[in-house]
Amino acid sequence: MSDCEIPGLTPRSAQALIEAGEALAHDVRARILHSPRPVFLYYIEQTFTILLRKLREGEDPNPDTPAQHLCLHLMITRAQTREQTADPDLLRLHRALVADGVHEALMRAGRAPGGAAFDFVALGDALSPTGISAFFAPLEPDDMVA
């Protein structure tokens, strides 16, 4: 991990997010070649890479796109489940990120049955071509939550 400080996050919280993001990116990367949506998954993997770069460089991980918003939500959720105790930084970041519930439909579209890992292929199947473009497009300033 970088020695850079991220405003509002302890080094431990930042490291937990990095580890969660690395694991999620690895999961996506492992599915790319055998997926019916390899290009979509490639862009998801790149989204995790962007968020990880921000965290490693000590930048605030504020999401710039709906894809980053969703991926950061998944990173926070995974980091929280890995922690033995509740991390107040992650709880605060999670509350700020999900405050408006804008991405809840995306979460439902990709929620795998039985609590398995998030299904990005199902999410890609649920989005129209216009929806996929909007998913990776920059958020409007009034859409930003975190």
Image (cartoon, grey):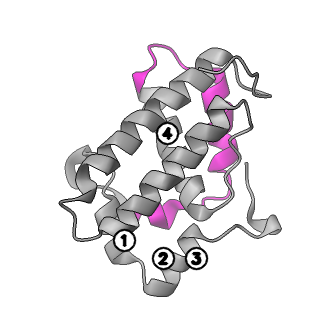
- Mark 3 touches mark 4? (CB < 8 Å): no
Bounds of the magenta segment: 82-108
**First in sequence: mark 3 vs mark 1:** 1
Q: Taking 101 as reference, is 125 above or below it?
A: below
Q: Is residue 19 found inside the magenta-colored segment of the image?
A: no
Name the amino acid type tagged 2. Ile
Q: Quadrant of residue 38?
A: bottom left
Q: Do tag 3 and tag 2 residues touch (Cβ < 8 Å)?
A: yes
SS label for mark 2: helix
The location of residue 46, given as percent across then percent down, is 49, 54
Task: State the residue position of label 1.
Answer: 124
Q: Which mark is residue 75?
A: 4
Q: In whole angstroms, how far apart are the C-alphas of marks 3 and 1?
A: 12 Å
Label 3, residues with CA under 10 Å away: few <14, some 14-19, many ≥20: some
Labelled pair 1, 2 in contact (Cβ < 8 Å) = yes
Tag 3 near tag 1, CB within 8 Å: no
